[in-house]
Every structure is written in structure tokens, then in C-alpha cells.
Image (cartoon, grey):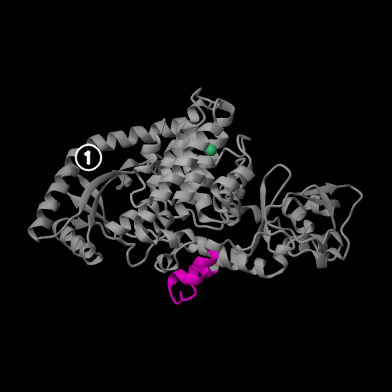
Amino acid sequence: MTTLKEITSEMADATPEDIAFVEKAYECSKKAHEGKKRYSGEPYFIHPAATAKVLAEYGMDATTIAAGLLHDAVEDGCISREEVEKEFGKELLFIVDGVTKLGTHKYHGAERHAESLRRLLVATASDIRVLIVKLADRKHNMQTLGHVPEHKRRRIALETLEIYAPIADRLGMGKMKSMLEDLAFPFVDPDAAAHAAEVRKLKKRETESGLAQVQKELLAELKKKEFAILRSDIRMKGLWSLHQKLRRKDDDINLIHDIAALRFVVPTIEDCYTTLGTIHAIYKPLPGEFKDYIAFPKPNGYQSLHTTVVTPEAGIVEIQIRTEEMHRRAMFGIASHMSYKQLGKGVEKLRKGIQKSRFSTLSFSWVRSLIPSLMKISKKEGAARGVTKAPPWLAELADAHTDIAGSEEFVEGLKEDFFSHRVFVFTPKGDVIDLPAASTPVDFAYAIHSDLGDHIQGAKVNGKLVSFDTELGNGEVVEIIRRDSAHPSPKWLDIAKTSLARRHIRVALGMTEPDKPSRRHKRTWFKKK
Ligand code: MN
């Protein structure tokens, strides 16, 4: 059982009020969940307590940690929303409500909907802290997944692997991402997971002593140059990402050079390049394998130098070089920018929202790509349609990035923005369908199947009958009532927003010849790694 002390001891720079606030939430949650059990038979309270500890480790503020403690209490009916608001304030209730809302969107394994669901989750989390609590919650649930009834395990594990781990990745939370992946992988594909573990173990045994030797030699050489190396370690590749790579390389372990990698953490960016120079002077680098993610960060903000060299001691070795700041960001991503371990006395500012300056150096282009469409929706009659307006943290990001232009990333961003003018709706079964903003039930029907589109009798949104020209809003459940005798009318050409629907309507009206089968389900938004 996670003790209160274990949580508060992580809150290094917290005020006595912060500590007292978390303590109060701890006691309240403990009482609220009293008598309830986890599947393991343990007291339910171990779960919110463990979630809160993760949040404290990530340096989150007292409100978020307390929200972690109470995140299941309202939904499980242990305490009322009114009581939570009265005791802990609107802000905490807001986060708890957000986490509950995210939990209602479930992934049922249709891969073509995965990207839409990821985007939906991010777009509906009105506060980045909601996503971070959700990820911490999921981490503990995955650690205890073995106790969950078997028929539920796979769905939860698959959702973790295909929805939550990629979200953690997009938010730059590398540590969370690989942890979620490796916890979920064995439940999704036990044989492949066992195989990857075996490959990793073999490789480790094979290269361990050689790698340590290379490390020693390089450290000695760098020391000669009176060079401050803060840290050096050997990092093993995660099982899931190893599995992905094995698949790409036809299971040829000899083509994978980064199962074990040497990592150097140095004080400054300049030191990164000097270290690289020293390494290349000793070991010959493999041509084409050098990557400068410092000058060209990954879209999720990741920065490092990667090089692959040939060593007599350990064969081909990948080496990663970064500063402490880059290392921290690679681990914690967006969370590290909100961390009050970092902000120190800026806690008060943090409470009021995200500190703008912290984000000016950030490049979460994926998150940013959600901004224009959300802003657009919010300015239109979005509120009237019940569409969430741009969450404040997204708006902050948008403000911080108005001056970005001219870079390769900007062009990338434009491409993504094109896809972000979308609306995400659900089928009655819970599948996500993504459509252009302002789409109608007619577009929805044709997106599912042309036969359904050709026979729309009526449409329901969230269980209520609506007219065909109703603009669909994010998160709505859309149901089409089909009837054989129903047929498209010329008016539908004005109602439909997608070219796909218009094309089918024209065919049904006898205006054109049918064309080749649509490739709409093969569309992918992001290059697979
Ligand atoms: Mn939970």
C-alpha cells in the first residue's frame, strides 16, 4: 500500500498547504473506497494511491495529485460531485470529471479507428492534466491486469498498446510510453512477447561485457579531455519496440543495432557535439546511421544525437548523446514542462494555467495540429452545438507558436492541420468515425457503407431523431435508420460535405457512372515508424 509519506516525499518544493491538501485527499479517498476491493482482493484504495504516487513522481501539482487520489471516487459512487467540489474545489472536480469522461470512450480493436480515437481523447481532455492522470491511472491498471478476468484483459491491453501508449508518445512521455507498451504486450500477443524477451536476453548476454568495456574506454578518453560527463548508462530497448523492429527486419537480429545502446548525458549542447567528435575519432561510424535530433527534434520534442559505431569489443553499437534537460524531457515530455519540481516558485503561476514561456521552446506538432480546427469550431456556433471549445492548454500552445514558420516542421504541421479539420463521432457500437468538420448524418452513413448511405430513412444523434442536414459534433453517437425503400434525393448533394458521399449520391441519382471501389479505409494519417 502506497503511504501518504511516499507520495508527499516526492513533492520536493511543495508548500505546507499543498501537502495538507494532498493529505486531505488521501484520507478522503481512503474512506470513500473503504470496504471496496480490487480484482486481486486487495483494498481498492491501493489503486488511487498508486496513481497519485506516479503523479507526484512526475512532479505534478498538488491539485493533480489529489485528483489522482479521487479519480475513481465519484464514478464509483463513494462520494458526490458536490462534496468533492465543496472540499477540494472546482479545479479538482474538473480534472476528475475529465478522467471519467475519457474512460467512456473505449477502443474495440478496429485499427482504422485508432488514430481518430487518439485524437478524440486528446481533443476532449480539456486540460492536459486530465490526460496525465489518465495515463498514471492506466499504468497502475496495467501493472495489476493479471488479476482482471481473462475476457477483459486483452481488450484493455490492446487499448493501452494502440491508444494510450501512442498518446504518451505524442506527448513526449517516453518513459510512460515504453512502460505501457511493455506491460500490455504480453497480454496482446504472449508468444511474440516471449520471443522478443528471449532475443533481448540473448543480446544482453552477448554484448554486456563488451559494451561495458566500450563505455569504460570512452569515459577514460573523455576524461582525458577534461570533459564533464554527468552520466553514462546502458539502456535496453523496450520489448514492444524491439518486436516492431524485428518484424520490419524479417526477424533478423543481426540487422538491429540498438537493442542495447550506450547513453551519455553531458552538461551542454556543445558538449554533445564534442562528445560525438571524440567517439567518431575512436570508432568508425556506420555511414547513414547518424541522426541529429538536436538540430532537428522529433515532432514530439525528442532531442538527442544518435550514432552507430563499429567497435572491436562489442561489434556494432548505438550511442545516444544528450543534455540533462533533453534527457528529462525524453522521459517525462509535456509533463516535465508542467512539473513544479522544475517551476519551483512558479507554482502559483502553474495553478492559473500553463506557464506560457515554458512552451515557447516546445515542438509538440501533433498536439499543435489539433489547434486550428478546435479554434475554428469554437469561434463558430460551436457552443450551440455542444462542441467543446478549444481547451485552454491548447489555446496556450497556439499562442506560443504563432511565430513558428519557415521550418520543415512548419510544412509538416500544415499537412497535419489539413487532417485536423475533422469531427469525431461514434457508431452505436462505439467505433469512431472521422469526418470533415461540418459533416452531416448523410456523410456519416456513406462513410460506413454506400449501401447504408443509399437507404437512409432517418438519423439519430445521441438517441434523438435529427434532420439530415444536422452538423455533427465531436463525440456524438450517430445512428442511421435504414430502409430498403428509402433513396437519395437531389437535395442531399447540398447536405453532404464529403466528396465520397456526393459521388455515391450522384451515382444513385443516375447522374454518373459508378467508379472504382473507394480506398477510404486505407487512409493513414501518420507515417508508420
Ligand atoms: Mn482508476
Residue 104 visible from this viewpoint: no
**Quick one: which residue is furthest to the top in this view?**
41
Question: In the image, 515: left or right of 46?
Answer: right
303 or 96, which is in the foreground?
A: 96
Main secondary structure found in the magenta portion: helix
Residue 413 belongs to magenta span: yes
Amino acid carrying mark 1 in the image: Thr
Image x and y of residue 483, in percent:
88, 47
Q: Is residue 479 magenta?
A: no
The residue drawn where x is 59% and y is 68% is 372
Residue farthest left in this picture: 224
Q: Position of residue 3 (x, y in %)?
A: 39, 34
Height in image: 39 above or below 529?
above
Quadrant where the N terminus sits is top left
Q: Relative to the observer, which residue lies in front, 493 or 129?
A: 129
**Which residue, given by chain and number where applicable, does mark 1 sit on?**
207
Residue 183 appears left or right of 229? right
Crowdedness of circle 1 by 10 Å Cα count: few (<14), some, many (20+)?
some
At 74% from the left and 55% from the top, the residue drawn is 444
Percent across and percent down for residue 489 are 89, 61
Q: Quadrant of residue 228?
A: bottom left
Residue drawn at (48%, 34%) of the image:
47
Residue 51 appears anywhere in the view: yes
Toward the right, the furthest residue is: 485
The residue stretch that appears in magenta = 394-414
| Picture layout, residue 168 above or below residue 505 | above
Q: Is residue 272 left or right of residue 419?
A: left
Query: Which of 267/302 is in front?
Result: 267
Q: Position of residue 168 (x, y in %)?
A: 46, 50
